[in-house]
Amino acid sequence: MMTASPDASAQNAKVEGVAKALQKKAMEEDYLATEFPKAADKLEKAIAACGNDKCSPAIRASLRRDLGVVQIGGQLDKEKGIGNFVEAIKLDPAVALDPDLKTKDLDAAFAEAKKRAAGGAPAAPVGDGSQPAGDFTHTPAAEQQIRTPIPVYVEYSGEEQLAKVIARYKGFGMTDWKTVELKKMGDKGWGGLLPCADVQQGTTQYYLQGFNAQNDPVATGGDRNNPYKVPVKREAVADPPHLPNVSPPTQCADTGDCPPNFPGCKKAGPLTGPAEPTGKDGGEFCEEDSECRSKECKENKCTEPEGAHKDIPKVWVGLSVGFDYALVPSADDVCKLKPTNQNQEPLNEQNYYCTESGGADYPYRLAGPGDVVPPGRGDNNALVVGTSDKVSGGGAFGNIRVMASIDYALSLNMLLGLRFGYVINAYPGQAGKDDGKTFPPIHLELRGTYLFGKDALAQKLAPYAMVGAGLSTFDTSVKVSVVEQVAAVKTARDVDAWHIAGPAFMTFGGGARVAFSARAALMAGLRVNLAFGNAFAPSAGPDLGIVFGF
């Protein structure tokens, strides 16, 4: 058995020490400073020094791995990077990416390398680097200096009417795409700047999307798989790019902070506190989860973030007042009673009951045999039929309703609740009560309310529609003139004819909800009632109230 000589072993240890020193400088200094060519050069020197047998397989594998990281992470040559990953895996199957340097792109490339090392099919070839086509006329900047905004100017001449144009971009070291909305410039142009903090040495990629008024994507320029690319370098560029008729943007100050998700940047520690969620709001167009505040994209729409609008109360109580303007039917002899000795009922079939001033029944009802009409009270036998107490029909003011309410918010748009209260200006007589044709002057209602608009309960102004049903008093009085004839003398007097409808009713209507704060709002609308039961009567009126959330 042959063994290496002591001199050879010492020589190998010296080469390994040099290789490790070059590797450390390449990854901890050059790579993190985005000096990718310098990092690659040091690693290639270390690999050459190790040769095929002067360093251990584990060291040679780690050098190949790091060279692949620089070539892919620094966007120098993806295919060469994957090739170096393959060589690293063959040298040491246990080799793995450094957790502090991992990105989605590196993970994907390393997975592809494992497949190739195991004999799997190679990945599709990388494109030739040409800029993509699309619905926009656009020429990307030839290059830009580090930490300097990248101007993006596009023109659109298509048939669609664009309401918004965005650029979705990803700078070097970023794992997720960000969005910048371009502003209208002239008749066909749209322009904007990719922010300087995300313009790091390497390559910045972006693609374009145009939306119509319904927020549907109707125009594109490139896509995430074939984006526009702008090389970014440390030195100043000879011909700085700029928007039309605008000076070139200036370089931002170096704050010393590395960009989010940059390889080698440590995640925030526990003392930094939770980061404020960023991204698109619920309902906005999306293509992937990372675009949304909720981190969830369903059917190209962002879902609502968990706990969104959690400050909006579920229970709302309030006070409201409503006024009825009712339509009453026409009828003749509305005060005349049937000619019986007792328990006399109205001759009319429209459910009219008459009262005198003060609320006493008119005409006087005989209590039984032997009862006589008191002096000054109306005598049913004296009423002249066919010549008086006639209602022509039409509109008249009815009841006033003062109500308390309680509603439960099933969602930020839907409420279900109760209304209960007192009815003012109700029928004051006794005869209608005795005949079972009245209802106590109260209001009981089950109501559903729908607020229009996204998260309407959280908005300052929201239109609403409502529908309800319940039991209540629906009384409407009109003045009528009656003629009494005693002997040959005729006397005319004015009395109130009350049309008694309900007590069952259905109601519907709509209006606007105006919020003073997250816990107080004014409700103002118009309500239509359809009362039925003893008699039918439609009515309408304003419905005004204030509600408070708890």
Image (cartoon, rainbow, N blue to C red):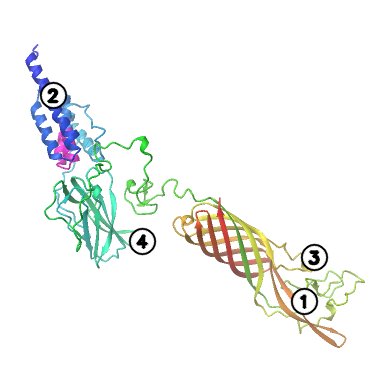
* Foreground tag (4 vs 2): 2
- Residue at which label 2 appears: 17
Dot 4 or dot 2, earlier in sequence: 2
- Type of residue at label 2? Gly
Dot 4 or dot 1, earlier in sequence: 4
Question: Does residue 359 appear to the left or right of 99 in the view shown?
Answer: right
**Considering the image in quadrants, where does the N terminus appear?**
top left
Q: Which quadrant of the figure has residue 74? A: top left
Which label sits on residue 335? 1
* Foreground tag (2 vs 3): 2
Q: Is residue 191 above or below residue 119?
A: below
- Marks 1 and 4: in contact by CB < 8 Å? no
- Residue farthest along the bottom direction in this orientation: 488
- Residue farthest along the top direction in this orientation: 1
**SS under mark 3:** helix
Spatial separation of the CA atoms under disc 2 and disc 1: 118 Å
- Residue at which label 3 appears: 434
Dot 2 or dot 3, earlier in sequence: 2
**SS under mark 1:** loop
- Within 10 Å of the Cα at label 3, are there few (<14), some (14-19), or many (20+) other Cα atoms? few
Spatial separation of the CA atoms under disc 3 and disc 4: 62 Å
Which label sits on residue 214? 4
Residue drawn at 10 percent across, 17 percent down: 10
Residue drawn at 13 percent across, 38 percent down: 80
Q: Is residue 443 visible?
A: no
Task: Using the image as rendered, state which of residue 227 and residue 278 is in the foreground.
Answer: 278
Q: Is residue 409 above or below residue 53?
A: below
Which residues are the magenta region?
Answer: 66-87
Question: Does residue 449 appear to the left or right of 269 in the view shown?
Answer: right
* Foreground tag (2 vs 1): 2
